[in-house]
Image (cartoon, helix red, strand yellow):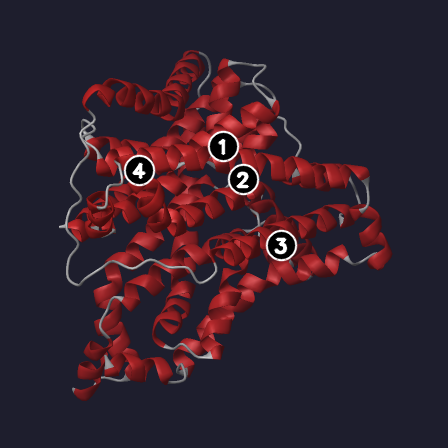
């Protein structure tokens, strides 16, 4: 423990601080340029756009969609988590993996599947339903982990004092899982505010759709930049509100050592209704979209399916996603190491700056980098490096979080031993700490790879000239109502995204079970 405190008190070495600072500056670049662009007509022009009736309506519509979707995800996520971790639900382990698979279906693919089956399926109800079915795993995963790792002793004490099962759940279990549920709800709210594909396909005007339309239909990009700035301010306000609500509250497990398994609650006569409810959720979130894709893929294949274009789009998708994952993870390593090992003000500032992308929706990052590329970096405008830069800004927080948590679990004393044997600080970090943290870092890279494959607005605006990915081909065909042509691209995208999603879900499930044994 003394080795850990000594490492935490030192200043980060330049070999870590320099690339970490670069990563932080890259993350802040779109936000800074967006603000400059939004104020290009002066404060008066900014206020004029903000004060429009349509702008105020957008705020209400965006918040309404985020609120309804988050509430639905809390109900589904917490309910499924409890059924699959604390009860005798049949086939719990398999269903837990299946319940995470909606993460492999991009929201715009799910929206396409529903719209292709029901042409009048659009507007607010459709958007709320599709986003809820796509986002509930963000609540399910952390709540399931919390339910698995909490100490059974607290609930046993409550039962011994005469509380029934419902009272114990409400008074003991809910406070223990509240931080995990709040974190998942925050991710859902941020996802909904930043989502572009689903609301665009389902024709529901919120910030992201109007920003894209404004940029495409006007020679003056300033209104789009103003709306983008407002959207960022809204997401920051939600993050701040969640942080204030959470406060300093925390819950710790009683005792030491490994947690005991919770005794499973027998469902008995509730087994049938529980199975029916879970089957309904999985059918709506998985079976129906996949069935719709299969139907339209068969129709498209029976007409004119250009296999060469499909393979080319799939190859381009894998290529840019792999580049995004490699560059993002490489920049995240020094930031994550500093966050885990050096906890001074400088390290905290670098880490917080790297999380700027968490408050930047894809359409806002894309818009900022379009302005930046045209004006200051034209040689890379509509080239692969600018698209990869967008992926770095958007998904750096995912990789930083994975690196930080993995490095934090590697005992600092191992680095001390390596240095006592003649290793340099950088050599000890590379050969010891990162070796131990390797699986966690790889999981973070896989998550970034998955999200890069699914990303639509930044890819749509920044992809190299002549390059089409699965997402952009799907978008183009859906815009003109060619569902048969769009379906093969959607199906291949889901297939490619399914493998890392299953591996991530399986790894999380293994970690959760390991913590309970």
Q: Is residue 45 visible?
A: yes
**Which residue was labeled with disc 3?**
369
- Residue under the image location 43 percent in, 42 percent down: 453
**Which residue was labeled with disc 4?**
81
Question: Which numbered circle lies on residue 192?
Answer: 2
CB atoms at circles 1 and 2 under 8 Å apart?
yes
CB atoms at circles 1 and 3 under 8 Å apart?
no
Mark 1 or mark 4: which comes first in sequence? 4
Observer-side mark, 2 or 4, equals 4
**Which residue was labeled with disc 1?**
131
Along the line of sight, the residue nearer the viewer: 272 or 417 = 272
Observer-side mark, 2 or 3, equals 2
Along the line of sight, the residue nearer the viewer: 504 or 299 = 504
Please, what secondary structure does the residue beneath circle 1 have? helix
Residue 407: x percent and y percent? 29, 67
Label 2, label 4: how far apart the Cα atoms are: 21 Å
């Amino acid at each position: 423990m003394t080795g850990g405190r000594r490492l935490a008190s030192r200043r980060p070495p330049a070999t870590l601080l320099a690339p970490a600072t670069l990563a932080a500056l890259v993350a802040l670049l779109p936000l800074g340029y967006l603000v400059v662009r939004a104020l290009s007509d002066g404060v008066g022009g900014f206020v004029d756009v903000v004060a429009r009736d349509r702008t105020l309506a957008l705020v209400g519509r965006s918040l309404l969609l985020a609120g309804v979707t988050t509430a639905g995800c809390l109900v589904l996520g917490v309910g499924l988590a409890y059924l699959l971790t604390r009860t005798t639900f049949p086939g719990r382990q398999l269903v837990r993996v299946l319940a995470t698979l909606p993460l492999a279906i991009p929201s715009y693919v799910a929206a396409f599947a529903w719209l292709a089956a029901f042409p009048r399926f659009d507007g607010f109800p459709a958007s709320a339903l599709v986003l809820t079915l796509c986002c509930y795993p963000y609540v399910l995963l952390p709540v399931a982990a919390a339910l698995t790792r909490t100490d059974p002793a607290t609930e046993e004490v409550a039962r011994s004092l005469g509380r029934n099962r419902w009272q114990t759940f409400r008074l003991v279990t809910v406070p223990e899982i509240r931080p995990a549920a709040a974190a998942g709800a925050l991710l859902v709210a941020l996802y909904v505010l930043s989502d572009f594909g689903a609301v665009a396909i389902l024709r529901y005007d919120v910030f992201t759709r109007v920003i894209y339309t404004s940029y495409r239909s006007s020679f003056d990009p300033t209104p789009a930049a103003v709306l983008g700035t407002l959207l960022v301010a809204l997401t920051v306000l939600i993050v701040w509100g969640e942080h204030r609500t959470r406060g300093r509250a925390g819950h710790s497990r009683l005792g030491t050592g490994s947690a005991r398994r919770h005794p499973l609650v027998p469902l008995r006569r509730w087994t049938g209704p529980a199975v029916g409810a879970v089957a309904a959720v999985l059918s709506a979130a998985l079976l129906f979209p996949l069935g719709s894709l299969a139907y339209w893929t068969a129709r498209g294949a029976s007409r004119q399916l250009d296999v060469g274009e499909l393979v080319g789009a799939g190859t381009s998708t894998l290529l840019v996603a792999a580049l995004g994952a490699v560059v993002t993870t490489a920049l995240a390593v020094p930031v994550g190491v500093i966050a885990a090992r050096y906890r001074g003000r400088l390290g905290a500032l670098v880490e917080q700056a790297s999380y700027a992308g968490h408050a930047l929706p894809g359409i806002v990052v894309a818009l900022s980098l379009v302005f930046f590329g045209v004006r200051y970096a034209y040689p890379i405008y509509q080239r692969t490096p600018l698209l990869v830069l967008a992926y770095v800004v958007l998904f750096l927080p995912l990789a930083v979080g994975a690196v930080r948590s993995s490095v934090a679990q590697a005992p600092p004393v191992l680095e001390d031993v390596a240095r006592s044997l003649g290793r340099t600080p950088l050599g000890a970090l590379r050969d010891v700490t990162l070796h131990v943290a390797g699986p966690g870092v790889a999981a973070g890279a896989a998550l970034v790879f998955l999200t890069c494959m699914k990303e639509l607005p930044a890819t749509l605006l920044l992809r190299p000239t002549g390059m089409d990915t699965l997402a952009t081909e799907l978008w183009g065909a859906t815009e003109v109502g060619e569902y048969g042509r769009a379906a093969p691209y959607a199906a291949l995208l889901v297939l490619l995204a399914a493998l890392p999603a299953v591996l991530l879900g399986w790894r999380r499930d293994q970690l959760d079970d390991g913590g309970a044994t």
